[in-house]
Amino acid sequence: MEHGRGRPKRNARHEAERWADEVFHKKNIAYLDERLHPDLVNHTAPPGMPAGRDSCKAFQTYLADSYPDCKVTINDVITEGDDKVVTHWTLRGTHEGHVFGVEPTGRRVEFSGVSISHLDSDGRVREMWAYVDAMAVTNQLGLSAGEPVVPPKGDIDKLLANR
């Protein structure tokens, strides 16, 4: 079926569920090469992290490694036209890796977030915004409310060096 400017209509829910499966469940970070535009702009990249595709891949790896048994559930997907997608998701997993400057706690965590994607004509993410319930992460990791929940500079440097 054709949609919009002569492009086939995408199944946004299927694509969001595939992202969760490939990246978080199968740890297939290379999948992001086909889903992220080479000139991606991540408007909500963690402080100190570049806003491009490589840093987005590095951060996805960081989360997947920090919660190696994580399961990501896609709760809702809302589209506008054929180039904007809003995804409400929930991540559940055990904090087994160094994350946000916090040593592994072994605690089970559950937090939700919303990702907004602007797609190019090939369906790749050209721009993205992601918002996470940082208070839930802070509370479940046993941090005080004033402590940051972003990767420390040393972690960022290691992430980017490995990609």
Image: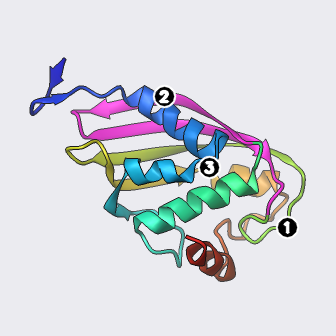
Quadrant of the image containing the C terminus: bottom right
Give the amino acid at mark 2. Asp
CA neighbours of label 3 inside 10 A, class few (<14), some (14 to 19), many (20+): few
Question: Which residues are the magenta region?
Answer: 70-97
- Residue at 61%, 81% in the rendered image: 157
Helix, strand or loop at disc 3? loop
In the rendered structure, the answer to whether residue 139 lies left or right of residue 131 reads: right
The residue that mark 2 highlights is: 76
The residue that mark 1 highlights is: 103
List x then y, in percent, for residue 96: 84, 55
Instruction: Say whether residue 93 is magenta.
Output: yes
List x then y, in percent, for residue 25: 66, 39
User: Hey, which quadrant is residue 80 in on the image?
Assistant: top left
Give the amino acid at mark 3. Asp
The mark nearer the N terminus, 3 or 2, is 2
The CA distance from mark 3 to mark 1 is: 20 Å
The mark nearer the N terminus, 1 or 2, is 2
The one nearer the camera, 26 or 73, is: 26
Magenta-colored segment: predominant secondary structure:
strand
